[in-house]
Amino acid sequence: MLPFINVEPKQLVPKQRAARKTTINAVEKRPKQADKLERRGEGSAAVNHVMKQIKNIYRAGNNQPIPYFKLICNPQNFMDTVQNSLIISFLIKENLIWMENGADGLPQIKLNNSKESIASEPFQAICRLDLELCEKYAKYYNIKEPMLKRAEVDES
């Protein structure tokens, strides 16, 4: 039975590769409303406004350190307190102000007037900030009005 079987090898047909598909780039579309493109430096304006206020407070207090929690706490609006804390952290990171422990063990803010500290290595301070802590320091420092006021936003 074996002699009747056809044992010729199969012919290998090379497969054709699929042609590479070219992708067409999407057409650029402009937004219909351009309000987000025309943003002004809202964050930097707020930081500059707070820095000016800190300089005025510092000079008015005979260049004495300003208690950190007295500076940032706003007893009427906790979100302003959080915003103030964030802005102060930017100013510290940029070496425009210093933070140090006061005689009472609480942090204090000082203006940085020396140029040598720019080369110093940065440090990090972490503290808990919640509504309860804000109310505690508002009572401790007898805060009725916030030291840092919000900048007026120009709507034009």
Image (cartoon, grey):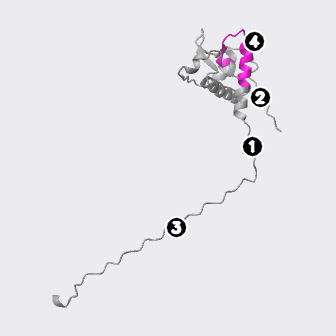
- Residue 106: percent from the left, percent from the top? 60, 14
Q: CA distance from mark 4 to mark 2?
A: 20 Å
User: Looking at the figure, which quarter contains the N terminus?
Assistant: bottom left
Q: Are marks 4 and 2 in contact (CB under 8 Å)?
A: no
**Label annotation for residue 21:** 3
Disc nearer the start of the sequence (4/2): 4
Give the residue at mark 1.
38
Q: Is residue 113 magenta?
A: no
Disc nearer the start of the sequence (3/1): 3
Compared with residue 41, is residue 131 higher up or lower down, i.e. above or below? above
**Label annotation for residue 143:** none
Q: CA distance from mark 4 to mark 1?
A: 37 Å
Give the residue at mark 4.
60
Amino acid under disc 4: Ala
Q: Is residue 57 left or right of residue 106?
A: right
- Residue 144: percent from the left, percent from the top? 75, 18
Judged by depth in the image, the label closer to the viewer, 2 or 1, is 1
Task: Label 4: state its secondary structure.
Answer: helix
Amino acid under disc 2: Ala
The picture quadrant where one finds residue 36 is top right
Q: CA distance from mark 3 to mark 4?
A: 71 Å
Secondary structure mostly seen in the magenta stretch: helix
Mark 2 surroundings within 10 Å by alpha-carbon count, few (fewer than 14), some (14 through 19), many (20 or more): few
Disc nearer the start of the sequence (4/1): 1
Compared with residue 5, is residue 76 higher up or lower down, i.e. above or below? above
- Residue 81: percent from the left, percent from the top? 68, 26
Amino acid under disc 3: Lys
Q: CA distance from mark 3 to mark 2?
A: 56 Å
> Can residue 130 be seen in this snapshot?
no
Q: Are marks 3 and 2 in contact (CB under 8 Å)?
A: no
Magenta stretch, residue numbers = 49-70
